[in-house]
């Protein structure tokens, strides 16, 4: 296991590369979903206001 | 998305655990499993934007505007990943984080193209005008794509030539190749599934004044 983490001495490089990658991939996965929720509630709110007036 | 995740997991396992260490580079070569697919995707996404931009300019198809617009942020992230992971790999291998070599510089220009495209999109109030302006920028930028692809052949650079160039007989061991292909499939699935989510909210905003969106929202509102 520690051999695996060590990556033949390149551990810090390999894992930091994978870390950056994972971070970007997770952000790209989560952000559009948040945005979709926001758009939904924003538009729904707008329609409600319109109906009331 | 689940299929993408499956490919990621098997690809990463194959790449990080199963594949033998490179005889010259040791274990540092394992960065290619994220570097190469990211770089491929950065070009592929740009072509998606460019093709849709051409459709926007010629036929004014709305869905193409949506696709081009939604792809840009993803393309920019893939380009960033290709540069960042390449740079992290370059430090131990080339002894430097960055060189102004043709491949690296043209890829950096691609990143600026993406960022310029995104900035241009948000600069216009009117989405349709933004889409057309962006389309022109995207099509002008297409000239950069072959430059990136062939930069390693046209100029003698520090960046090594493509690993998977010879179809049929790739110059890479099969145990290293399979995880790489798996990762590429995973990146593709990931891209399309995120793209669909992005398009969905984009279309909602686009069509926010139409009857079907109103129906969708008021029904959802009453159900909740």
Image (tube, coloured by chain):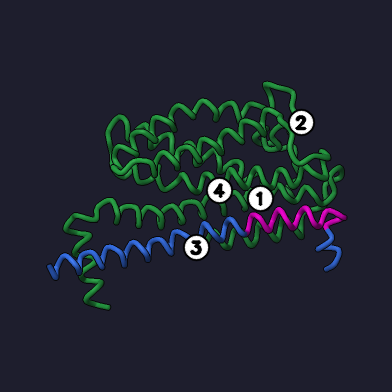
The subunit carrying tag 2 is B
Judge the density around disc 2: few (<14), some (14-19), many (≥20) Cα neighbours within 10 Å: some
Q: Which residue is mark 3?
A: A30
Q: Could you say where residue A10 lies in the image, as x and y percent from the top left?
A: 83, 53
Kindly identify which residue carries mark 2. Answer: B158
Shown in green, the chain is: B
Q: CA distance from mark 3 to mark 4?
A: 14 Å
Residue at the extreme left: A53
Mark number, residue B34:
1
Q: Earlier in the sequence, mark 2 or mark 1?
A: 1
Of the residues under marks 2 and 4, which one precedes in the sequence?
Answer: 4
Question: Residue B92 at what x, y percent from top left?
Answer: 83, 45
Q: Check the image and report above or below for B100 versus B211.
A: above
Badge 4: few (under 14), some or many (20 or more) residues near its Cα, within 10 Å? many
- Observer-nearest residue: B168 or B222? B222
Q: Are marks 2 and 4 on the same chain?
A: yes
Judge whether residue B175 can be spotted in this image: no
Q: Residue at x 51, y 64 (%)?
A: B2
For residue B187, side relative to residue B139 (left or right): right
Residue at x 41% of width, y 61% of height? A35
Give how far across and how far down residue B159 sits, in percent.
73, 33
Mark sitting on residue B77: 4
* Badge 1: chain ID: B
């Amino acid at each position: 296991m520690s051999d695996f983490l060590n990556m033949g001495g390149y551990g810090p490089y390999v894992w930091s590369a994978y870390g950056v990658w994972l971070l970007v991939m997770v952000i790209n996965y989560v952000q559009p979903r948040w945005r979709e929720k926001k758009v939904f509630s924003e538009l729904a709110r707008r329609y409600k206001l319109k109906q009331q007036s | 998305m689940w299929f993408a995740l499956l490919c990621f997991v098997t690809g990463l396992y194959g790449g990080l655990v199963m594949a033998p260490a490179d005889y010259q580079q040791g274990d540092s070569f394992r960065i290619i499993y994220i570097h190469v697919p990211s770089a491929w995707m950065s070009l592929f996404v740009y072509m998606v934007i460019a093709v849709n931009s051409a459709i926007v300019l010629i036929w004014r198809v709305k869905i193409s505007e949506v696709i081009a617009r939604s792809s840009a942020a993803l393309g920019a992230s893939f380009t960033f990943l290709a540069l960042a992971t390449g740079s992290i790999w370059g430090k131990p291998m080339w002894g430097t984080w960055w060189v102004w070599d043709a491949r690296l510089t043209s890829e950096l220009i691609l990143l600026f193209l993406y960022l310029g495209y995104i900035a241009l999109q948000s600069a216009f109030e009117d989405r349709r005008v933004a889409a057309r302006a962006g389309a022109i920028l995207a099509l002008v930028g297409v000239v950069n794509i072959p430059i990136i692809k062939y930069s390693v052949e046209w100029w003698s650079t520090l960046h090594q030539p493509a690993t998977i160039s010879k179809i049929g007989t790739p110059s890479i061991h099969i145990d290293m190749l399979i995880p790489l292909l798996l990762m590429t499939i995973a990146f593709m699935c990931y891209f399309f599934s995120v793209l669909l989510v992005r398009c969905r909210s984009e279309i909602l905003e686009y069509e926010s004044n139409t009857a079907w969106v109103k129906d969708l929202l008021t029904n959802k509102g009453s159900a909740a």
